[in-house]
Amino acid sequence: MSSSGGGSIATPLVRGVVAAAVSLGTVLAITVVPALAAQIAGSGSSATALDAVLIALNLLVLGHGGGVTLGTGVIEGATTLTPLGLSLLLVAVSALGMRRVGRGLDLVRDDGVLRTRALRDAGGALGAYTAVYAVGMAVVGALGRSGEASPVIASALVSAALIAVVGGLLGLLWSVRREATATIPAVRVLALLPSPFDAVARAVLLALGGLVAAATALVVVLLVISIPGQSALFDQLAPGVVGGAVLTLLQLALLPLLIVWAMAVLLGGTVSVGSGTALSLHGVESGVLPALPMLAAIPQPGAAPVWVWALLVLPIAAVVLGAYRLVRDTTGLALRDRVTAWVAYPVLVVVAVLLVAGLSTGRIGEGRLVHLGPVMSTMLLPLLGIVVLSTAAVIGLLATPAVPWVRGLVGSLRERVERAEEEERGVGAARSEVMDDDAADADSTGSGASTASDAATAPDASTASDAASAEESGTSLAAGSPSER
């Protein structure tokens, strides 16, 4: 009976088993083929094809997150450093396999709703896939045992199950996603989550994406700057064409490790690359590093310049961006839902960063490479400070009355200042008018006084003139001739 009809669980189980077998074959090919190619190209090497296959199987166990005990004479002890690039590739293989299973099970109806027994069928397929895949990797680990390397079977089983579950869930969710058509509505994975956790998931993914982007940009800049040093190391190794290709693949598998380490440094933590080697925003303490060309990107030993601390802006901006998206998406929800989202966002960001940083730590033997990766105790407090304080600042500014209150206060102060300026301008204008009136009155008063003075002065002058004329006439008469007298 068809699974889509909801009667039998056999079809989902069979689909899961088949998908697991295909995925196991794919991951074996991904690791074994390059190892055999390197063995064939290395004419000067004493390693046989069987040695190359055993190395590939051990690398596959490490890629799943398992452990391998080495006894090569050069490296002695447990090796647990996970090549995250290979891990991401293995997750992608599982996701692709379970995506095909999900599409074959028709988990979503035409109206965009999960069909009857969709969760049962998806769970059955994922369970079968995980069981077969994990057991298969345990067998691979057992087959990879040799005198120099011994995979830890229990860790291979558990880590493979984890990869299968994570990749399988991603694949099933990917199969549910659907673009809208003229007759069929769109189906978005995050939209299936209940509110407000859909908004929290979007904000967390946005913040983590920003952190990874900032760390990737830093690693790319360092790699570009260190190209001459990488070329010199590559020339010293002289791996040849095929060996160079394998070395490049190995570095690509380790590149995500460098990105996670750079993210830890940007968040204020310290990264150890073996005994005596530490990287942080304070500076670099460098010892003897493995002869891997990409490690030439590590800065020279010494104290870092002060401006390096400005790089803290990058993770702060990523967290702020996620918090802004969260506040925007939760606007209009009930207060309880908003508070739940505000608390869940920083918690999930901190947990996710610590989880990724923990996955990037490990060891290679018991020598000087006994600890590789972020020192978790050094990044916990800076991480909490950046995430919690940035989130609180965004929420305080955008989701509380703080901004409207400040705007109202500024507006009130502005109105008071404008009102005072208007009153001052009014008083000044009134004073100016009074002064103009006083000046006009003074001018008119002065003009009247001048006229009166002129009028009073004119008769006096005429009288004085007449008196002078009479006096002159009298004098003239008195000074007449004797005969007249």
Image: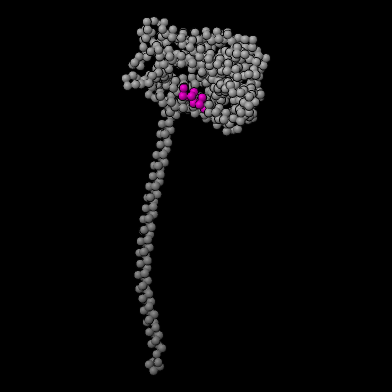
Query: What residue sits 54% from the left and 20% below the top?
Result: 85
Query: Where does the image place residue 166, in percent across and percent down from the top left?
Result: 48, 14
Q: Nearer the viewer, residue 289 or 337?
A: 289
The image quarter in which residue 475 lies: bottom left
Residue drawn at 36 percent across, 72 percent down: 458
Which sits in the foreground, 373 or 398?
A: 373
211 part of magenta stretch: yes
Whether 138 is drawn above or below 453: the answer is above
- The secondary structure making up most of the magenta span is helix
Q: Quadrant of residue 469?
A: bottom left
Is any atom of residue 204 visible in this view? Answer: yes
Q: Is residue 256 above or below residue 2?
A: below
Q: Position of residue 24 (x, y in %)?
A: 51, 12
- Region in magenta: 204-214
Q: Position of residue 219 (x, y in %)?
A: 55, 27
Residue 146 lies in magenta, yes or no?
no
Residue displayed at 41% across by 31% down: 404
Q: Seen from this angle, which residue lies furthest right? A: 73
Q: Quadrant of the C terminus?
A: bottom left
Q: Is residue 169 visible?
A: no
Q: Residue at x 66, y 24 (%)?
A: 287
Asked if residue 305 is positioned above or below residue 485 in the image, the reply reads above
Question: Residue 20: percent from the left, percent from the top?
Answer: 48, 10
